[in-house]
Image (tube, rainbow, N blue to C red):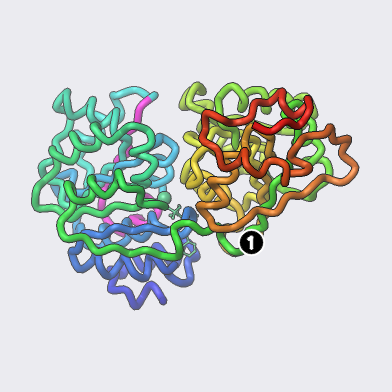
Amino acid sequence: MQFSELGLRIALQDAVAELGYKEATPIQAQAIPLLLDGRDVIGSAQTGTGKTAAFALPILSRLGPHGPGPRCLVLEPTRELAVQTHENFLKLSKYTRLHCGLVYGGVGYGAQRDAFKQGVDIITATPGRLLDHLQEGAVKLDLVQFLILDEADRMLDMGFLPDVKRIVMKCGKERQTALFSATIPPAIETLIQWAMKDPVTVEIGARRSVAETVKHVVYPVAELQKQDLLLALLDKIHWESVIVFCRTKRSADDVLYSLKRARHKAAVIHSDRSQKERQQALEGFREGYYEVLVATDIAARGLDIADVSHVINYNVPEHPEDYVHRIGRTGRAHASGDAFTLFTASDAQDLQSIERFISKKIERVKLEGFPYQYTVLFDEAKLGPVAGKSRGARIGKGYFFGPAKRR
Ligand code: ADP
Ligand code: MG
């Protein structure tokens, strides 16, 4: 589907052409006409499928000239995503006269207040800071006609639901609402019923699939050898840029330290780093200065990082959806990527939920020449009954260096 066939204003078609987009992605081809038509839309498609332009283009097309506002509000779960979406709006609105504003925490209030005073048509915001401004009376949302809840699943995961509700209540009643998410868990269904009017659902691809272009495998390893295996993998495989996902801030910092000791150019993003440090890490990685980006899942969700050659899960993700999200960072835009997950015995249960979620067994592989210590995972058949047990019955780490007894 060509952008010229979608009914967008010429100013937007020109901006799209300048960005080099040739054809609309499936979510864009389906959501844009509906949003232009005034419908509420629930859009679900994997990370990296162009959801931002799917809502930004029709809204920019319908907003007309600059006017009193704000008339469009986009909520994002993290600062990085807010920045990214705002930048998209700036590029796409280049040939319009619309003003775009960005609101997020961790920076001063002054510039954001000034922007409200000067008048913005579109605000991209994280919930917390926007609520601060609303409480102060620095901005009002009663003229908002377009409300976008982006990355809604993550917004809920991060506990933003009460904030989101408070913000939605302050928006104009006669509005169009769109919700975008890679997955639609049940908690979102309530938000949908409450905030949206007769929405149409546009769902592209199975919510539970990993892109077909991605080859993903699991590396069983003893807990104590994880860092060594990570370094060995980086030595052996041919890669250009890698994101390493960690479950906790602590393990992210540890991994960063060992990467630096091995003379890799690496940076980390997690929520204990200042906004400036996170932005700098991200930019450095995008520009190729850092070759490895270590990130906790929350910090990295949905970030548009192009051309990652490899994703390495240093920990098996706890939530199966996160596995799909993380892997979604490679294999984007048809370049085939590889994703590795380091798998220790204590992850048996989590890996099994992932495999159930994606309805597929992930291939186990070993790195040739690596001085592996034994783990029970090397004869996984023995794990059989354990994997099916409840969380409480999970096997502890030490067990694998002792005799293999059943529980
Ligand atoms: P999502 O929100 O679905 O994760 P984004 O909106 O962040 O995805 O887009 C991912 C990347 O794809 C961005 O770099 C964006 O510029 C690019 N992109 C979006 N639409 C198109 C298109 N129609 N053709 C080519 N690239 C596109
Ligand atoms: Mg997005």
Left or right, 88 with respect to 332, comes to left
Q: Is 100 part of what is drawn in magenta?
A: yes
Where does residue 190 sit, x and y in percent of width and height? 23, 46
Mark 1 residue's CB less than 8 Å from ligand 1: no
Amino acid type of the residue tagged 1 in the rendering: Ala
Magenta stretch in the rendered image: 89-105
Quadrant where the image shows the N terminus: bottom left
Quadrant where the image shows the C terminus: top right
Residue 305 visible in the picture = no
Left or right, 188 with respect to 78, comes to left
Q: Up-down: is 195 above or below 7?
A: above
Tell me which residue sits at (37%, 46%) in the image: 151
Observer-nearest residue: 288 or 17?
Answer: 288
Where does residue 220 sit, x and y in percent of width and height? 73, 41
Tell me which residue sits at (62%, 36%) in the image: 347
Helix, strand, or loop for circle 1? loop
The answer to which image quadrant residue 123 occupies is top left
Left or right, 237 with respect to 201, comes to right
Where does residue 39 sit, x and y in percent of width and height? 19, 63
The answer to which image quadrant residue 24 occupies is bottom left
Tell me which residue sits at (21%, 62%) in the image: 62
User: Circle 1: is it few (<14), some (14-19), or many (20+) Cα within 10 Å?
Assistant: few
The residue to which callout 1 is attached is 335
Tell me which residue sits at (29%, 63%) in the image: 201
Residue 10 visible in the picture = yes
Q: Is 393 part of what is drawn in magenta?
A: no
Observer-nearest residue: 103 or 325?
Answer: 325
Q: Up-down: is 365 above or below 202?
A: above
Q: In this figure, what is the number of numbered marks?
A: 1
Where does residue 59 sit, x and y in percent of width and height? 26, 58
